Amino acid sequence: MTELKQSRSLAAILGYAALVVALPVAVLGLMPANEYKAWGGAGIDCDGPGPVLFFGILGLAIYGAGAVLNGRHFRKPFRLLVAGTCVLICLALIPNVADAVREQRLNELASETCG
């Protein structure tokens, strides 16, 4: 019985460590999709939307899973705090991923091509 409890606590610690290690991925997903528009210009950013989409979707997957897995145990205050933090990170990533998709479509429709 104690062996099962130890393996569960080790899995929980590894899960929390994975959420902490994945925080830079979420931060990279929060970069602007078009740096020129973020600075006030109107240029086409050829390499902007790709990394934002990659890191944003990866961050959504990691922190979405963290919210679901920790949200199942909502009666435990620490797990509720972790699930709430994961939801907040997902809510920050969703608009940025949507902007990256919009910029990607604008880049495909622009007459000036990248390359």
Image (cartoon, rainbow, N blue to C red):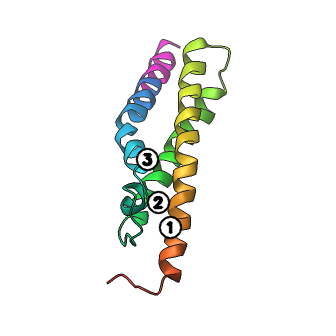
* Crowdedness near tag 3: few (<14), some (14–19) or many (≥20) residues, C-alpha within 10 Å: many
Q: Residue at x 42, y 24 (%)?
A: 13
Query: What is the chief secondary structure element of the magenta stretch?
Result: helix
CA–CA distance in space, label 1 to label 3:
14 Å
Please tell me which of labels 2 and 1 falls first in the chain: 2
Q: Is mark 1 on a helix, strand or loop?
A: helix
Q: Please provide percent x and percent y for residue 99.
A: 54, 58
Q: Which one is in front, 33 or 62?
A: 33
Judging by the rendered image, the residue that carries numbered circle 3 is 30
Q: Please provide percent x and percent y for residue 43.
A: 38, 71
Q: Which one is in front, 87 or 12?
A: 87
Q: What numbered label is drawn on residue 58? A: none
Q: What numbered label is drawn on residue 103? A: 1
Q: Please provide percent x and percent y for residue 88.
A: 56, 33
Kind of residue at disc 2: Leu
Q: Which residue is drawn at 39% across and 40% down?
A: 22
**Image position of 73 (left or right of 11):** right
Q: Which residue lies furthest to the left in this view?
A: 115
Please tell me which of labels 2 and 3 falls first in the chain: 3
Q: Residue at x 60, y 12 (%)?
A: 77
Kind of residue at disc 3: Leu
2 in the magenta segment: yes
On screen, residue 75 above or below 63: above
5 in the magenta segment: yes
Judging by the rendered image, the residue that carries numbered circle 2 is 53
Q: What element carries label 2?
A: helix
On screen, residue 39 above or below 24: below
Report the magenta residues as a range.
1-10
Q: Please state which of the two labelled residues, at mark 2 or mark 1, is closer to the viewer.
A: 1
* Crowdedness near tag 1: few (<14), some (14–19) or many (≥20) residues, C-alpha within 10 Å: many
Q: Please state which of the two labelled residues, at mark 1 or mark 3, is closer to the viewer.
A: 1
Kind of residue at disc 1: Glu
